[in-house]
Image: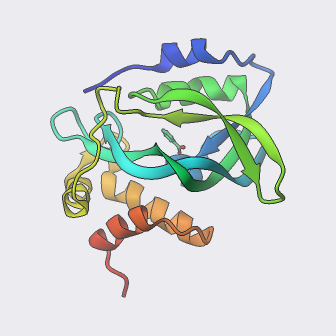
Amino acid sequence: MLLDTSALNQQRQRVGDDESVWLFGYGSLIWKADFPFLERRRAFICGWERRFWQGSHDHRGTPEAPGRVATLVASPDAVCHGMAYRITGETLKPLDIREKNGYLREITTLTFDDGKHAEGLVYLATEENPAYLGDAPLDAIAAQIDRAHGPSGANREYLLNLACALRELDVDDPHTFALANRLMPPA
Ligand code: BEZ
């Protein structure tokens, strides 16, 4: 089901057009940075795990046949590695619209490679949003991703691009890799 969260997000943390803010990316933002940014740095956030539990009815699937994309689930001892971008409020606005299906912006603490910290934003889709699909057997999640297509392209492309980007960053992500290996077993 579609839930347009873009207006909600713009009211949650107001960022002036010329102000800058860190945005933590853990999904498509890692491999698809098709927006202007002031800085890009590897980073991680604590207490969260990446999971393909959010339905995609508008990008990598359709309302009739939703795909699955990444969200984060709370897990006290976990660390989620990704990419942080320092962007202006002007850049954040179109991202709010692009990532409108159930994701709400939250404030989080980012840790950079050099151990320094910064406050930033992250898009989270929780089980309270109607597009949330939640857990399922890995084979079923992989099969759903394999057959889903949407206006932004094949769902499998999203998964395989993310798995490839995580490998390049030397990040171990058993959930993402288990799904990707089901679609494209290692040679
Ligand atoms: C991300 O890459 O962090 C992301 C992208 C779209 C929606 C939510 C998160």
At 54% across and 71% down in the image, what residue appears? 167
At 23% across and 50% down in the image, what residue appears? 148
The answer to whether one can see residue 38 in this image is no
169 vs 74: above or below: below
Decide which of 113, 96 is in the foreground and name it. Answer: 113
Decide which of 45, 20 is in the foreground and name it. Answer: 45
Residue that sits furthest to the bottom in the current view: 187
In the image, taking residue 54 as reference, residue 122 lies left or right, namely right
Q: What is the quadrant of residue 17 in the picture?
A: top right
Question: On the rendered image, what quadrant is the C terminus found in?
Answer: bottom left
At 23% across and 40% down in the image, what residue appears? 66
The answer to whether one can see residue 171 in this image is yes
In the image, taking residue 100 as reference, residue 30 lies left or right, namely right
What is the total number of numbered labels drawn onto the structure image? 0
Residue that sits furthest to the left in the current view: 64
In the rendered image, residue 105, in percent from the top left (x then y), is placed at: 56, 27
184 vs 149: above or below: below
Residue that sits furthest to the front in the current view: 76
In the rendered image, residue 29, in percent from the top left (x then y), is placed at: 56, 47
At 39% across and 27% down in the image, what residue appears? 102
In the image, taking residue 4 as reference, residue 75 lies left or right, namely right
Decide which of 52, 73 is in the foreground and name it. Answer: 73
Q: How is the image coloured?
A: rainbow
Question: On the rendered image, what quadrant is the N terminus found in?
Answer: top left
In the rendered image, residue 73, in percent from the top left (x then y), is placed at: 45, 44
In the image, taking residue 176 as reference, residue 65 lies left or right, namely left
